Image (cartoon, rainbow, N blue to C red):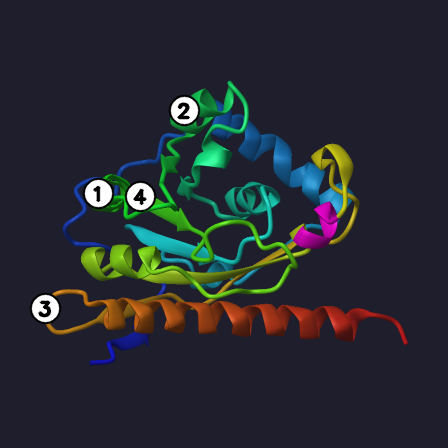
Amino acid sequence: MRPNWKHAPPAWRAATSPVADEPERLPAVYAALKRVLPPVLRRFFAFRVSGLEHLPEQGPFIVAANHANYLDGVVLATALPRKISFLVMPRVYRATPLHPYFHDHVGSIPVSLARPDPGAIRRALRVLEQGGVVGIFPEGPFSQYGQLVRGQPGVALVALRSGVPVVPTAISGTFQALASRRFFVPRRVPLAVRFGKPIRFTWPRQRATQGLRADVTGGIMEEIAALLAADESRASAAVPR
């Protein structure tokens, strides 16, 4: 059975979240980066954010975005007013000896891509139950060619079990910024984040089957693809002719 899904109003909030009304406390490093990164990205990368009006004002939600490289997490965390707890794959979590300490400090959730990881799903659900925001890149590993690929079902599992809205998100420019670059230093190209309307998935109270998860994941990826196409059209229209 294909799940019903609809756009949720931006002001949706979880009635069961006990901390939804409390001011959000950011980890020290996260807060420092939130102060430093916006002016840097705007000045050197013409950083642009659109669709902020679509974000739920309060309560938990999932941000689901396309994924090219490590810059995606940087620009997405900069664009979103609230703290995001990202699901990160092992090679990102352990990129250097210092990375595990950084990710633990900012609240990242390590997740295995080699096999099902119920522990990571439980941690993501716990963040949402506490009124937080979870960031998921449904494609999994970085895109090698800068093209959107098939999403993996983890995002659907979290969305169906939690019942919270999913905000589809398009990130543009990060692949071009790092393509063929040595030492991971980005070239100066325009970077952009576009948030779409939040989606709520509803389904009969039954087990989330493989087919159901595939349908939900496909719906999310279609929304991301549409946002990317809209951003590409805007960029093309802005080019002088």
Q: Nearer the viewer, mark 4 or mark 2?
A: 2
Residues under numbered marks 3 and 1 in contact, where contact means CB atoms less than 8 Å apart: no
Q: Which residue is mark 1?
A: 122
Badge 4 marks a residue whose secondary structure is loop
Q: Which residue is mark 3?
A: 206
* Residue 153, quarter of the rendered image: bottom left
Work out how far the residue at label 4 is from the one at label 3, CA to CA, in angstroms: 26 Å
Q: Does the stretch in magenta take in 15? A: no
Q: Relative to residue 212, is residue 143 depicted above or below? A: above
Query: Tag 3 or tag 2, which sits nearer the N-term?
Result: 2
Asked whether residue 27 is in view, the answer is no
Residue 132: image tag: 4
Pick whichever, 19 or 153, lies toward us.
Answer: 153
Query: Tag 2 or tag 4, which sits nearer the N-term?
Result: 2
Q: Nearer the viewer, mark 4 or mark 3?
A: 3
Badge 1 marks a residue whose secondary structure is helix
In which quadrant is the N terminus drawn? bottom left
Which portion, as a residue range, is magenta? Answer: 175-179
* Residue 13, quarter of the rendered image: bottom left
Q: Amino acid at mark 3?
A: Gln
Query: Image check: 204 left or right of 76?
Result: left
Q: Nearer the viewer, mark 1 or mark 4?
A: 1
Give percent across and percent down for residue 104.
39, 26
Q: Which residue is mark 2?
A: 105
Work out how far the residue at label 2 is from the one at label 3, CA to CA, in angstroms: 37 Å
Work out how far the residue at label 3 is from the one at label 1, CA to CA, in angstroms: 19 Å
Badge 3 marks a residue whose secondary structure is loop
Query: Tag 3 or tag 4, which sits nearer the N-term?
Result: 4
